[in-house]
Amino acid sequence: MSDARAQQGGAVRSSATAELGGGHSIECRRWFRLSGGAVWGIAAGLYLLAEVVVAVGAPVFTSANPLTGNLEHRLLPPGSPGYLLGTDQLGRDVLARMLYGARVSLVVGVVAVAIAGSFGVLVGLIIGYRGGWLDKIVSQLVDAQLSFPFMALALSIAAVLGAGLGGIVVTLAISSWVLYARLVRGESLVMRQQEFVEAAYALGVPARRILLRHVLPNVLGPAIALASLEAGRLIVAESSLSFLGYGIQPPIPAWGNMLAEGKDYMARAWWLTVLPGLAVSLTCLSTTILGDWLTELFDPRRRR
Amino acid sequence: MTRYLAGRLALTFLTVFMALSFMFGVLHMAGDPVLLLVPVDSSAEHIERMRVQWGFADPLWVQYGRFVWRACQGDFGTSLKYNLPALSLVLERLPATALLTFASILFAVVLGLPLGILAAVREGRLADRLSNVGSVLGQSIPSFWLGLLLILMFSVTLGLLPTGGMGTLAQLVMPAVTLGLYSLGRVAKLTRSSVLEVLRADYVRTARAKGVRETTVLVRHVLKNAAIPIVTIIGLQMSGLIGGAIVVETIFAWPGLGRLIVQSIQFRDFPAALAAVFFTAVTVSLVNLLVDLLYGFLNPRVVHE
Protein backbone atom coordinates (compact mmCIF):
# COMPACT_ATOMS: atom_id res chain seq x y z
CA MET A 1 0.00 0.00 0.00
CA SER A 2 2.65 2.49 0.99
CA ASP A 3 4.84 0.91 -1.65
CA ALA A 4 2.39 1.93 -4.36
CA ARG A 5 2.47 5.44 -3.02
CA ALA A 6 6.22 5.41 -2.89
CA GLN A 7 6.45 4.15 -6.44
CA GLN A 8 4.24 6.92 -7.60
CA GLY A 9 6.17 9.45 -5.63
CA GLY A 10 9.24 8.18 -7.41
CA ALA A 11 7.53 8.40 -10.77
CA VAL A 12 6.42 11.97 -10.29
CA ARG A 13 9.81 13.08 -9.16
CA SER A 14 11.64 11.25 -11.88
CA SER A 15 9.62 12.99 -14.56
CA ALA A 16 10.15 16.31 -12.83
CA THR A 17 13.87 15.82 -12.56
CA ALA A 18 14.06 14.49 -16.09
CA GLU A 19 12.68 17.78 -17.28
CA LEU A 20 15.39 19.54 -15.36
CA GLY A 21 17.74 17.38 -17.36
CA GLY A 22 21.39 16.65 -16.83
CA GLY A 23 23.26 13.91 -15.06
CA HIS A 24 22.13 15.18 -11.69
CA SER A 25 18.69 13.65 -12.09
CA ILE A 26 19.48 10.42 -10.24
CA GLU A 27 21.22 12.21 -7.41
CA CYS A 28 18.44 14.76 -7.20
CA ARG A 29 15.79 12.12 -7.16
CA ARG A 30 17.46 10.21 -4.37
CA TRP A 31 17.97 13.35 -2.35
CA PHE A 32 14.39 14.50 -2.86
CA ARG A 33 12.95 11.14 -1.94
CA LEU A 34 15.04 10.96 1.17
CA SER A 35 14.12 14.44 2.30
CA GLY A 36 10.37 13.72 2.14
CA GLY A 37 10.03 10.66 4.31
CA ALA A 38 13.29 11.20 6.13
CA VAL A 39 12.20 14.23 8.15
CA TRP A 40 9.19 12.39 9.50
CA GLY A 41 11.04 9.11 9.80
CA ILE A 42 13.84 10.64 11.84
CA ALA A 43 11.38 12.59 13.98
CA ALA A 44 9.51 9.35 14.71
CA GLY A 45 12.78 7.62 15.53
CA LEU A 46 13.75 10.41 17.91
CA TYR A 47 10.38 10.20 19.63
CA LEU A 48 10.82 6.46 20.14
CA LEU A 49 14.33 7.04 21.44
CA ALA A 50 13.01 9.60 23.92
CA GLU A 51 10.44 7.06 25.03
CA VAL A 52 13.14 4.49 25.65
CA VAL A 53 15.08 7.02 27.71
CA VAL A 54 12.14 7.96 29.94
CA ALA A 55 11.08 4.33 30.33
CA VAL A 56 14.53 3.09 31.29
CA GLY A 57 15.22 6.11 33.45
CA ALA A 58 11.72 6.29 34.95
CA PRO A 59 13.03 6.59 38.55
CA VAL A 60 15.09 9.60 37.48
CA PHE A 61 12.13 11.40 35.96
CA THR A 62 9.71 10.80 38.80
CA SER A 63 10.15 10.05 42.45
CA ALA A 64 6.59 8.81 42.85
CA ASN A 65 5.88 5.12 43.36
CA PRO A 66 3.72 3.74 40.54
CA LEU A 67 2.23 1.01 42.74
CA THR A 68 1.19 2.84 45.88
CA GLY A 69 -1.03 5.85 46.09
CA ASN A 70 -2.48 8.28 48.57
CA LEU A 71 -6.21 7.58 48.90
CA GLU A 72 -6.79 11.13 50.09
CA HIS A 73 -5.58 12.33 46.69
CA ARG A 74 -7.88 10.21 44.52
CA LEU A 75 -8.82 11.26 40.98
CA LEU A 76 -6.98 14.58 41.03
CA PRO A 77 -6.98 16.21 37.57
CA PRO A 78 -3.74 16.84 35.66
CA GLY A 79 -1.90 19.91 36.84
CA SER A 80 -2.74 19.39 40.49
CA PRO A 81 0.16 20.36 42.75
CA GLY A 82 2.60 17.47 42.93
CA TYR A 83 0.79 15.46 40.26
CA LEU A 84 1.62 16.70 36.79
CA LEU A 85 -0.74 14.25 35.07
CA GLY A 86 -3.13 13.81 37.98
CA THR A 87 -3.92 10.71 40.00
CA ASP A 88 -6.02 7.61 39.47
CA GLN A 89 -8.82 5.99 41.45
CA LEU A 90 -6.34 4.77 44.10
CA GLY A 91 -4.52 8.07 44.33
CA ARG A 92 -1.51 6.82 42.38
CA ASP A 93 0.54 9.24 40.31
CA VAL A 94 -0.51 8.86 36.67
CA LEU A 95 2.78 10.23 35.33
CA ALA A 96 4.75 7.60 37.25
CA ARG A 97 2.43 4.85 36.05
CA MET A 98 2.70 6.06 32.46
CA LEU A 99 6.51 6.09 32.62
CA TYR A 100 6.78 2.65 34.21
CA GLY A 101 4.05 1.38 31.89
CA ALA A 102 6.18 2.41 28.92
CA ARG A 103 8.64 -0.30 29.98
CA VAL A 104 6.09 -3.01 29.24
CA SER A 105 5.34 -1.62 25.80
CA LEU A 106 9.00 -1.24 24.95
CA VAL A 107 9.91 -4.75 26.09
CA VAL A 108 7.06 -6.09 23.96
CA GLY A 109 8.05 -3.91 21.01
CA VAL A 110 11.68 -5.00 21.18
CA VAL A 111 11.77 -8.54 22.56
CA ALA A 112 8.63 -10.00 20.96
CA VAL A 113 9.57 -8.49 17.61
CA ALA A 114 13.15 -9.79 17.93
CA ILE A 115 12.01 -13.34 18.69
CA ALA A 116 9.31 -13.40 16.02
CA GLY A 117 11.59 -11.69 13.51
CA SER A 118 14.61 -13.92 13.90
CA PHE A 119 12.58 -17.13 13.88
CA GLY A 120 10.40 -16.02 10.97
CA VAL A 121 13.37 -14.83 8.92
CA LEU A 122 15.19 -18.11 9.52
CA VAL A 123 12.19 -20.23 8.50
CA GLY A 124 11.47 -18.02 5.51
CA LEU A 125 15.06 -18.21 4.32
CA ILE A 126 15.18 -21.97 4.53
CA ILE A 127 11.84 -22.79 2.95
CA GLY A 128 12.25 -20.16 0.25
CA TYR A 129 15.69 -21.39 -0.71
CA ARG A 130 15.08 -25.11 -0.38
CA GLY A 131 11.59 -25.24 -1.84
CA GLY A 132 10.02 -28.65 -2.34
CA TRP A 133 7.82 -30.47 0.14
CA LEU A 134 9.21 -28.64 3.19
CA ASP A 135 8.21 -25.35 1.62
CA LYS A 136 4.74 -26.68 0.74
CA ILE A 137 4.03 -27.92 4.25
CA VAL A 138 5.38 -24.90 6.10
CA SER A 139 3.72 -22.45 3.70
CA GLN A 140 0.41 -24.20 4.24
CA LEU A 141 0.87 -23.92 8.00
CA VAL A 142 1.72 -20.25 7.64
CA ASP A 143 -1.41 -19.68 5.55
CA ALA A 144 -3.52 -21.55 8.10
CA GLN A 145 -2.25 -19.33 10.86
CA LEU A 146 -2.79 -16.20 8.79
CA SER A 147 -6.40 -17.13 8.07
CA PHE A 148 -6.93 -17.04 11.79
CA PRO A 149 -7.95 -13.75 13.39
CA PHE A 150 -4.85 -12.45 15.17
CA MET A 151 -6.64 -11.53 18.39
CA ALA A 152 -8.38 -14.91 18.71
CA LEU A 153 -5.05 -16.66 18.34
CA ALA A 154 -3.28 -14.35 20.78
CA LEU A 155 -6.11 -14.66 23.30
CA SER A 156 -6.02 -18.44 23.31
CA ILE A 157 -2.22 -18.65 23.51
CA ALA A 158 -2.25 -16.06 26.28
CA ALA A 159 -4.76 -18.25 28.12
CA VAL A 160 -2.26 -21.12 27.97
CA LEU A 161 0.86 -19.18 28.85
CA GLY A 162 -0.77 -17.19 31.58
CA ALA A 163 -0.64 -13.50 32.34
CA GLY A 164 2.59 -11.61 32.85
CA LEU A 165 5.26 -10.06 30.71
CA GLY A 166 6.99 -13.31 29.70
CA GLY A 167 3.74 -14.94 28.64
CA ILE A 168 2.67 -11.92 26.64
CA VAL A 169 5.99 -11.64 24.83
CA VAL A 170 5.94 -15.31 23.82
CA THR A 171 2.26 -15.10 22.86
CA LEU A 172 2.85 -12.19 20.53
CA ALA A 173 5.97 -13.79 19.07
CA ILE A 174 4.10 -17.01 18.27
CA SER A 175 1.24 -15.01 16.78
CA SER A 176 3.37 -12.91 14.48
CA TRP A 177 6.42 -14.84 13.24
CA VAL A 178 4.49 -16.06 10.17
CA LEU A 179 4.51 -12.60 8.62
CA TYR A 180 8.32 -12.56 8.48
CA ALA A 181 8.40 -16.13 7.20
CA ARG A 182 6.05 -15.24 4.36
CA LEU A 183 7.90 -12.05 3.44
CA VAL A 184 11.37 -13.59 3.55
CA ARG A 185 10.23 -16.74 1.74
CA GLY A 186 9.12 -14.61 -1.19
CA GLU A 187 12.30 -12.56 -1.20
CA SER A 188 14.50 -15.60 -0.93
CA LEU A 189 12.65 -17.32 -3.77
CA VAL A 190 13.59 -14.35 -5.92
CA MET A 191 17.15 -14.34 -4.63
CA ARG A 192 17.61 -18.00 -5.45
CA GLN A 193 17.33 -17.16 -9.13
CA GLN A 194 19.80 -14.30 -9.00
CA GLU A 195 23.00 -14.86 -10.91
CA PHE A 196 25.35 -14.28 -7.99
CA VAL A 197 23.53 -16.91 -5.96
CA GLU A 198 23.58 -19.38 -8.83
CA ALA A 199 27.26 -18.62 -9.32
CA ALA A 200 28.00 -19.32 -5.67
CA TYR A 201 26.04 -22.55 -5.95
CA ALA A 202 27.92 -23.58 -9.07
CA LEU A 203 31.21 -22.91 -7.27
CA GLY A 204 30.16 -25.42 -4.64
CA VAL A 205 29.55 -23.00 -1.78
CA PRO A 206 27.55 -24.83 0.90
CA ALA A 207 23.88 -23.89 1.26
CA ARG A 208 24.28 -22.49 4.76
CA ARG A 209 27.00 -20.14 3.60
CA ILE A 210 25.00 -19.04 0.55
CA LEU A 211 22.02 -18.28 2.78
CA LEU A 212 24.03 -16.31 5.33
CA ARG A 213 26.41 -14.49 3.01
CA HIS A 214 24.37 -13.91 -0.11
CA VAL A 215 20.66 -14.27 0.54
CA LEU A 216 20.26 -12.97 4.10
CA PRO A 217 21.87 -9.55 3.57
CA ASN A 218 19.55 -8.95 0.65
CA VAL A 219 16.35 -9.85 2.47
CA LEU A 220 17.26 -8.16 5.74
CA GLY A 221 16.17 -4.67 4.71
CA PRO A 222 12.50 -5.49 4.06
CA ALA A 223 12.46 -7.64 7.20
CA ILE A 224 13.73 -4.75 9.32
CA ALA A 225 11.11 -2.47 7.83
CA LEU A 226 8.44 -5.04 8.62
CA ALA A 227 9.81 -5.33 12.15
CA SER A 228 9.36 -1.61 12.69
CA LEU A 229 5.74 -1.76 11.51
CA GLU A 230 5.20 -4.87 13.61
CA ALA A 231 6.61 -3.24 16.75
CA GLY A 232 3.72 -0.79 16.70
CA ARG A 233 1.17 -3.46 15.95
CA LEU A 234 2.40 -5.70 18.77
CA ILE A 235 2.47 -2.81 21.25
CA VAL A 236 -1.17 -2.18 20.36
CA ALA A 237 -1.87 -5.92 20.64
CA GLU A 238 -0.25 -6.08 24.07
CA SER A 239 -2.32 -3.17 25.31
CA SER A 240 -5.45 -4.75 23.79
CA LEU A 241 -4.71 -8.01 25.60
CA SER A 242 -3.97 -6.20 28.86
CA PHE A 243 -7.14 -4.21 28.32
CA LEU A 244 -9.14 -7.43 27.94
CA GLY A 245 -7.51 -8.79 31.10
CA TYR A 246 -5.20 -11.34 29.44
CA GLY A 247 -1.98 -9.40 29.56
CA ILE A 248 -0.15 -7.55 32.28
CA GLN A 249 -2.17 -7.75 35.49
CA PRO A 250 -2.81 -4.86 37.87
CA PRO A 251 -1.31 -3.36 39.94
CA ILE A 252 1.73 -3.56 37.62
CA PRO A 253 1.23 -0.59 35.32
CA ALA A 254 0.80 -1.16 31.59
CA TRP A 255 -0.97 1.26 29.29
CA GLY A 256 -3.61 -1.32 28.45
CA ASN A 257 -4.62 -2.22 31.99
CA MET A 258 -4.49 1.46 33.00
CA LEU A 259 -7.13 2.07 30.34
CA ALA A 260 -9.18 -0.91 31.48
CA GLU A 261 -9.19 0.36 35.07
CA GLY A 262 -9.61 3.99 34.11
CA LYS A 263 -12.61 3.49 31.84
CA ASP A 264 -14.87 2.88 34.84
CA TYR A 265 -14.13 6.42 36.01
CA MET A 266 -14.61 7.96 32.59
CA ALA A 267 -17.31 10.39 33.62
CA ARG A 268 -15.27 11.81 36.51
CA ALA A 269 -11.70 11.44 35.30
CA TRP A 270 -11.24 11.77 31.53
CA TRP A 271 -7.45 11.73 31.85
CA LEU A 272 -7.45 8.07 32.94
CA THR A 273 -9.00 7.18 29.58
CA VAL A 274 -7.26 9.72 27.39
CA LEU A 275 -3.61 9.66 28.51
CA PRO A 276 -2.65 5.94 28.33
CA GLY A 277 -4.40 5.59 24.96
CA LEU A 278 -2.61 8.67 23.67
CA ALA A 279 0.70 7.07 24.65
CA VAL A 280 -0.15 3.85 22.81
CA SER A 281 -1.29 5.79 19.75
CA LEU A 282 1.78 8.02 19.57
CA THR A 283 4.06 5.01 19.90
CA CYS A 284 2.21 3.11 17.20
CA LEU A 285 2.13 6.21 14.97
CA SER A 286 5.90 6.63 15.34
CA THR A 287 6.72 3.03 14.52
CA THR A 288 4.39 3.21 11.50
CA ILE A 289 6.05 6.35 10.17
CA LEU A 290 9.49 4.93 10.86
CA GLY A 291 8.52 1.63 9.25
CA ASP A 292 7.13 3.32 6.14
CA TRP A 293 10.32 5.29 5.77
CA LEU A 294 12.50 2.21 6.27
CA THR A 295 10.42 0.27 3.75
CA GLU A 296 11.00 3.01 1.24
CA LEU A 297 14.68 3.15 2.07
CA PHE A 298 15.46 -0.54 2.08
CA ASP A 299 13.47 -1.96 -0.78
CA PRO A 300 15.65 -1.90 -3.86
CA ARG A 301 12.64 -2.24 -6.16
CA ARG A 302 11.26 1.02 -4.88
CA ARG A 303 14.44 2.89 -5.62
CA ARG A 304 13.94 2.83 -9.32
CA MET B 1 -11.84 -22.93 -13.69
CA THR B 2 -13.74 -25.77 -12.02
CA ARG B 3 -10.46 -27.48 -11.25
CA TYR B 4 -9.05 -24.30 -9.83
CA LEU B 5 -12.11 -23.82 -7.67
CA ALA B 6 -12.02 -27.43 -6.44
CA GLY B 7 -8.34 -27.06 -5.57
CA ARG B 8 -8.91 -23.83 -3.73
CA LEU B 9 -11.84 -25.27 -1.80
CA ALA B 10 -9.75 -28.28 -0.80
CA LEU B 11 -7.01 -25.96 0.43
CA THR B 12 -9.58 -23.91 2.32
CA PHE B 13 -10.84 -27.07 3.97
CA LEU B 14 -7.30 -28.07 4.90
CA THR B 15 -6.56 -24.62 6.30
CA VAL B 16 -9.67 -24.59 8.45
CA PHE B 17 -8.92 -28.09 9.66
CA MET B 18 -5.39 -27.14 10.65
CA ALA B 19 -6.56 -23.97 12.37
CA LEU B 20 -9.14 -25.95 14.30
CA SER B 21 -6.67 -28.64 15.34
CA PHE B 22 -4.21 -26.01 16.48
CA MET B 23 -6.91 -24.30 18.50
CA PHE B 24 -7.96 -27.61 20.01
CA GLY B 25 -4.42 -28.28 21.18
CA VAL B 26 -3.91 -24.80 22.55
CA LEU B 27 -7.18 -24.75 24.44
CA HIS B 28 -6.55 -28.12 26.01
CA MET B 29 -3.11 -26.99 27.09
CA ALA B 30 -4.77 -24.06 28.84
CA GLY B 31 -6.06 -26.41 31.49
CA ASP B 32 -8.97 -28.43 32.71
CA PRO B 33 -12.28 -26.60 32.46
CA VAL B 34 -13.96 -28.91 34.96
CA LEU B 35 -12.44 -27.05 37.89
CA LEU B 36 -14.17 -23.90 36.71
CA LEU B 37 -17.50 -25.67 36.29
CA VAL B 38 -17.92 -27.35 39.63
CA PRO B 39 -18.56 -25.51 42.89
CA VAL B 40 -15.41 -24.48 44.75
CA ASP B 41 -16.02 -26.85 47.66
CA SER B 42 -16.58 -29.97 45.49
CA SER B 43 -15.02 -33.21 46.62
CA ALA B 44 -12.28 -34.85 44.58
CA GLU B 45 -14.67 -37.71 43.66
CA HIS B 46 -17.27 -35.28 42.37
CA ILE B 47 -14.69 -33.48 40.24
CA GLU B 48 -13.50 -36.81 38.87
CA ARG B 49 -17.06 -37.88 38.11
CA MET B 50 -17.71 -34.64 36.25
CA ARG B 51 -14.47 -35.05 34.35
CA VAL B 52 -15.58 -38.48 33.15
CA GLN B 53 -19.06 -37.24 32.39
CA TRP B 54 -17.81 -34.36 30.24
CA GLY B 55 -15.25 -36.59 28.54
CA PHE B 56 -12.18 -34.78 29.84
CA ALA B 57 -10.82 -37.92 31.49
CA ASP B 58 -9.98 -39.60 28.16
CA PRO B 59 -6.53 -39.29 26.63
CA LEU B 60 -6.14 -36.16 24.53
CA TRP B 61 -5.98 -38.02 21.21
CA VAL B 62 -9.29 -39.76 21.99
CA GLN B 63 -10.86 -36.41 22.76
CA TYR B 64 -9.39 -35.00 19.55
CA GLY B 65 -10.68 -37.90 17.45
CA ARG B 66 -14.11 -37.57 18.97
CA PHE B 67 -14.08 -33.82 18.38
CA VAL B 68 -13.11 -34.18 14.71
CA TRP B 69 -15.62 -36.98 14.12
CA ARG B 70 -18.47 -34.99 15.62
CA ALA B 71 -17.41 -31.72 14.02
CA CYS B 72 -17.57 -33.38 10.60
CA GLN B 73 -21.17 -34.18 11.38
CA GLY B 74 -21.80 -30.58 12.37
CA ASP B 75 -21.83 -31.26 16.10
CA PHE B 76 -19.48 -29.11 18.12
CA GLY B 77 -20.73 -30.34 21.46
CA THR B 78 -22.55 -28.54 24.20
CA SER B 79 -21.37 -25.20 25.51
CA LEU B 80 -20.13 -25.66 29.05
CA LYS B 81 -21.23 -22.22 30.08
CA TYR B 82 -24.62 -21.86 28.45
CA ASN B 83 -25.51 -25.55 28.33
CA LEU B 84 -26.69 -25.10 24.75
CA PRO B 85 -25.44 -26.74 21.54
CA ALA B 86 -22.30 -24.77 20.68
CA LEU B 87 -23.29 -24.58 17.05
CA SER B 88 -26.62 -22.91 17.68
CA LEU B 89 -24.95 -20.55 20.13
CA VAL B 90 -22.58 -19.46 17.39
CA LEU B 91 -25.30 -19.22 14.75
CA GLU B 92 -27.25 -17.03 17.14
CA ARG B 93 -24.31 -14.63 17.47
CA LEU B 94 -23.30 -14.68 13.81
CA PRO B 95 -25.82 -12.11 12.50
CA ALA B 96 -24.68 -9.51 15.05
CA THR B 97 -21.05 -9.78 13.92
CA ALA B 98 -22.08 -9.88 10.28
CA LEU B 99 -24.10 -6.68 10.76
CA LEU B 100 -21.24 -4.94 12.56
CA THR B 101 -18.64 -6.00 9.99
CA PHE B 102 -20.89 -4.99 7.11
CA ALA B 103 -21.62 -1.59 8.64
CA SER B 104 -17.90 -1.01 9.24
CA ILE B 105 -16.89 -1.88 5.72
CA LEU B 106 -19.71 0.28 4.40
CA PHE B 107 -18.44 3.18 6.51
CA ALA B 108 -14.88 2.59 5.30
CA VAL B 109 -15.84 2.38 1.63
CA VAL B 110 -18.46 5.12 1.50
CA LEU B 111 -16.05 7.60 3.08
CA GLY B 112 -12.71 6.13 2.01
CA LEU B 113 -13.43 5.90 -1.71
CA PRO B 114 -14.39 9.57 -2.27
CA LEU B 115 -11.60 10.72 0.05
CA GLY B 116 -9.05 8.71 -1.90
CA ILE B 117 -10.33 9.96 -5.24
CA LEU B 118 -10.34 13.55 -3.99
CA ALA B 119 -6.79 13.17 -2.71
CA ALA B 120 -5.64 11.74 -6.03
CA VAL B 121 -7.33 14.40 -8.15
CA ARG B 122 -5.93 17.14 -5.93
CA GLU B 123 -2.54 15.52 -5.57
CA GLY B 124 -0.13 17.54 -3.45
CA ARG B 125 -2.74 20.08 -2.43
CA LEU B 126 -4.31 20.66 0.94
CA ALA B 127 -7.09 18.08 0.55
CA ASP B 128 -4.51 15.45 -0.36
CA ARG B 129 -2.30 16.25 2.60
CA LEU B 130 -5.18 16.32 5.05
CA SER B 131 -6.49 12.99 3.85
CA ASN B 132 -2.99 11.53 4.02
CA VAL B 133 -2.51 12.67 7.61
CA GLY B 134 -5.99 11.41 8.43
CA SER B 135 -5.39 7.97 7.03
CA VAL B 136 -2.09 7.57 8.88
CA LEU B 137 -3.77 8.67 12.10
CA GLY B 138 -6.71 6.38 11.49
CA GLN B 139 -4.37 3.44 11.15
CA SER B 140 -2.42 4.23 14.31
CA ILE B 141 -5.20 4.75 16.82
CA PRO B 142 -5.90 1.45 18.59
CA SER B 143 -9.55 0.51 18.27
CA PHE B 144 -10.13 0.01 21.97
CA TRP B 145 -8.96 3.54 22.70
CA LEU B 146 -10.94 5.04 19.85
CA GLY B 147 -14.02 3.25 21.17
CA LEU B 148 -13.50 4.63 24.66
CA LEU B 149 -12.89 8.13 23.31
CA LEU B 150 -16.12 8.00 21.32
CA ILE B 151 -18.01 6.82 24.40
CA LEU B 152 -16.39 9.61 26.42
CA MET B 153 -17.33 12.20 23.84
CA PHE B 154 -20.72 11.14 22.50
CA SER B 155 -22.18 9.22 25.44
CA VAL B 156 -20.67 10.64 28.60
CA THR B 157 -20.13 14.28 27.62
CA LEU B 158 -22.71 14.98 24.94
CA GLY B 159 -25.21 12.25 25.80
CA LEU B 160 -26.03 11.70 22.13
CA LEU B 161 -25.41 7.98 21.66
CA PRO B 162 -25.89 4.90 23.84
CA THR B 163 -22.70 3.34 25.22
CA GLY B 164 -23.47 -0.18 24.15
CA GLY B 165 -25.88 -2.95 23.31
CA MET B 166 -27.56 -3.81 20.06
CA GLY B 167 -31.01 -3.14 18.69
CA THR B 168 -31.27 0.41 17.42
CA LEU B 169 -29.38 2.16 14.66
CA ALA B 170 -27.90 4.59 17.20
CA GLN B 171 -26.24 1.67 18.94
CA LEU B 172 -24.58 0.59 15.71
CA VAL B 173 -22.93 3.93 14.95
CA MET B 174 -20.02 3.95 17.41
CA PRO B 175 -19.01 0.28 17.10
CA ALA B 176 -19.09 0.50 13.30
CA VAL B 177 -17.01 3.69 13.24
CA THR B 178 -14.54 2.27 15.77
CA LEU B 179 -14.09 -0.92 13.82
CA GLY B 180 -14.12 0.75 10.41
CA LEU B 181 -11.71 3.64 10.93
CA TYR B 182 -8.60 1.56 10.35
CA SER B 183 -10.04 0.19 7.13
CA LEU B 184 -11.13 3.68 6.13
CA GLY B 185 -7.49 4.76 6.25
CA ARG B 186 -6.36 1.78 4.21
CA VAL B 187 -9.10 2.15 1.61
CA ALA B 188 -8.50 5.90 1.21
CA LYS B 189 -4.75 5.47 0.87
CA LEU B 190 -4.99 2.66 -1.62
CA THR B 191 -7.72 4.36 -3.66
CA ARG B 192 -5.51 7.42 -3.91
CA SER B 193 -2.52 5.48 -5.18
CA SER B 194 -4.54 3.34 -7.61
CA VAL B 195 -6.36 6.34 -9.04
CA LEU B 196 -3.10 8.25 -9.36
CA GLU B 197 -1.59 5.39 -11.29
CA VAL B 198 -4.50 5.19 -13.72
CA LEU B 199 -4.67 8.97 -14.13
CA ARG B 200 -1.26 8.80 -15.80
CA ALA B 201 -2.25 6.07 -18.23
CA ASP B 202 -2.24 6.78 -21.95
CA TYR B 203 -5.91 5.96 -22.41
CA VAL B 204 -6.84 8.62 -19.86
CA ARG B 205 -4.79 11.19 -21.72
CA THR B 206 -6.44 10.08 -24.95
CA ALA B 207 -9.90 10.37 -23.44
CA ARG B 208 -9.12 13.86 -22.21
CA ALA B 209 -7.64 14.83 -25.56
CA LYS B 210 -10.85 13.72 -27.24
CA GLY B 211 -12.61 16.22 -25.01
CA VAL B 212 -14.46 13.74 -22.82
CA ARG B 213 -15.84 15.42 -19.74
CA GLU B 214 -13.68 15.08 -16.63
CA THR B 215 -16.40 13.32 -14.60
CA THR B 216 -16.89 10.78 -17.39
CA VAL B 217 -13.15 10.19 -17.56
CA LEU B 218 -13.07 9.62 -13.82
CA VAL B 219 -16.00 7.22 -13.71
CA ARG B 220 -15.55 5.36 -16.99
CA HIS B 221 -11.81 5.05 -17.27
CA VAL B 222 -10.19 5.77 -13.97
CA LEU B 223 -12.48 4.16 -11.42
CA LYS B 224 -13.13 1.07 -13.49
CA ASN B 225 -9.44 0.36 -13.75
CA ALA B 226 -8.57 1.42 -10.25
CA ALA B 227 -11.20 -0.97 -8.87
CA ILE B 228 -8.98 -4.04 -8.83
CA PRO B 229 -6.63 -3.18 -5.97
CA ILE B 230 -9.49 -1.51 -4.14
CA VAL B 231 -11.59 -4.67 -4.20
CA THR B 232 -8.58 -6.62 -2.97
CA ILE B 233 -7.99 -4.34 -0.03
CA ILE B 234 -11.67 -4.39 0.89
CA GLY B 235 -11.54 -8.19 0.94
CA LEU B 236 -8.41 -8.21 3.03
CA GLN B 237 -9.96 -5.73 5.41
CA MET B 238 -12.93 -8.04 5.89
CA SER B 239 -10.77 -10.69 7.50
CA GLY B 240 -9.06 -8.07 9.64
CA LEU B 241 -12.42 -6.71 10.72
CA ILE B 242 -13.62 -10.09 11.94
CA GLY B 243 -10.58 -10.26 14.23
CA GLY B 244 -10.92 -6.64 15.28
CA ALA B 245 -14.52 -7.30 16.24
CA ILE B 246 -13.21 -9.22 19.26
CA VAL B 247 -12.07 -6.00 20.93
CA VAL B 248 -14.79 -3.70 19.66
CA GLU B 249 -17.63 -6.04 20.63
CA THR B 250 -16.22 -6.25 24.14
CA ILE B 251 -16.11 -2.46 24.53
CA PHE B 252 -19.60 -1.84 23.24
CA ALA B 253 -21.24 -4.96 24.72
CA TRP B 254 -22.14 -6.03 21.20
CA PRO B 255 -23.54 -9.57 21.35
CA GLY B 256 -21.49 -11.06 18.52
CA LEU B 257 -18.99 -13.80 17.80
CA GLY B 258 -16.02 -11.78 18.99
CA ARG B 259 -17.42 -11.35 22.45
CA LEU B 260 -18.35 -15.03 22.50
CA ILE B 261 -14.73 -15.92 21.72
CA VAL B 262 -13.39 -13.74 24.54
CA GLN B 263 -15.92 -15.07 27.03
CA SER B 264 -15.55 -18.70 26.07
CA ILE B 265 -11.76 -18.61 26.23
CA GLN B 266 -12.01 -16.91 29.60
CA PHE B 267 -14.42 -19.56 30.82
CA ARG B 268 -12.54 -22.41 29.09
CA ASP B 269 -15.78 -23.18 27.29
CA PHE B 270 -14.01 -25.34 24.68
CA PRO B 271 -17.01 -26.32 22.55
CA ALA B 272 -18.21 -22.73 22.18
CA ALA B 273 -14.69 -21.41 21.54
CA LEU B 274 -13.96 -24.05 18.91
CA ALA B 275 -17.28 -23.56 17.16
CA ALA B 276 -16.79 -19.79 17.11
CA VAL B 277 -13.24 -20.11 15.84
CA PHE B 278 -14.41 -22.58 13.19
CA PHE B 279 -16.89 -20.08 11.82
CA THR B 280 -14.40 -17.21 11.83
CA ALA B 281 -11.77 -19.33 10.06
CA VAL B 282 -14.31 -20.50 7.47
CA THR B 283 -15.56 -16.97 6.87
CA VAL B 284 -12.08 -15.52 6.52
CA SER B 285 -10.99 -18.27 4.13
CA LEU B 286 -14.12 -17.95 2.00
CA VAL B 287 -13.80 -14.17 1.84
CA ASN B 288 -10.20 -14.58 0.67
CA LEU B 289 -11.31 -17.06 -1.99
CA LEU B 290 -14.08 -14.73 -3.10
CA VAL B 291 -11.60 -11.86 -3.40
CA ASP B 292 -9.34 -13.95 -5.61
CA LEU B 293 -12.24 -14.92 -7.84
CA LEU B 294 -13.49 -11.35 -8.05
CA TYR B 295 -9.98 -10.28 -8.92
CA GLY B 296 -10.03 -12.55 -11.96
CA PHE B 297 -13.45 -11.27 -12.91
CA LEU B 298 -12.41 -7.61 -12.72
CA ASN B 299 -9.10 -8.17 -14.40
CA PRO B 300 -9.48 -10.68 -17.23
CA ARG B 301 -5.70 -10.76 -17.63
CA VAL B 302 -5.51 -12.81 -14.44
CA VAL B 303 -5.88 -16.48 -15.29
CA HIS B 304 -6.64 -18.95 -12.54
CA GLU B 305 -4.73 -22.14 -12.98
Image: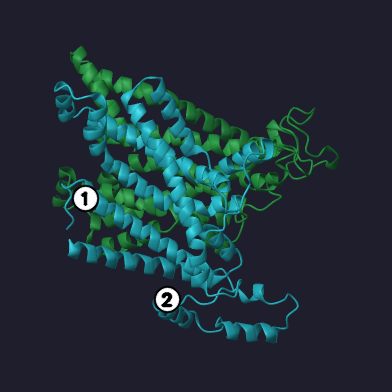
Chain colours: A green, B cyan
Image coordinates of residue A172 in percent, x first then y, are 50, 53
Q: CA distance from mark 2 to mark 1?
A: 33 Å
> In this rendering, does residue B183 appear at all?
no
Image coordinates of residue A112 in percent, x first then y, are 49, 49
Q: Which residue is mark 1?
A: B297
Q: Which mark is residue B74?
A: 2
Image coordinates of residue B9 in percent, x first then y, are 28, 65
Residue at 39% across, 26% down:
A37
Q: Is residue B47 above or below residue B175?
A: below
Pick whichever of labels 2 and 1 is earlier in the sequence.
Answer: 2
Q: Is residue B266 above or below residue A291?
A: below
> In this rendering, does residue A145 appear at all?
yes
Q: Is residue A102 above or below residue A178?
A: above
Q: Image check: B297 left or right of A172?
A: left
Residue at 79% across, 42% down:
A69
Q: Are marks 2 and 1 in contact (CB under 8 Å)?
A: no
Q: Image check: B283 left or right of A303?
A: right
Chain letter, disc 2 residue: B
User: If the image is split into quadrants, where does the C terminus of chain A sit?
Assistant: top left
Q: Secondary structure at mark 1?
A: helix
Image coordinates of residue B243 in percent, x first then y, are 47, 54
For badge 1, the amino acid type reads Phe
Q: Secondary structure at mark 2?
A: loop
Label 1, residues with CA under 10 Å away: few <14, some 14-19, many ≥20: few
User: If the image is split into quadrants, where does the N terminus of chain A sit?
Assistant: top left
Rendered image quadrant of residue B126 = top left
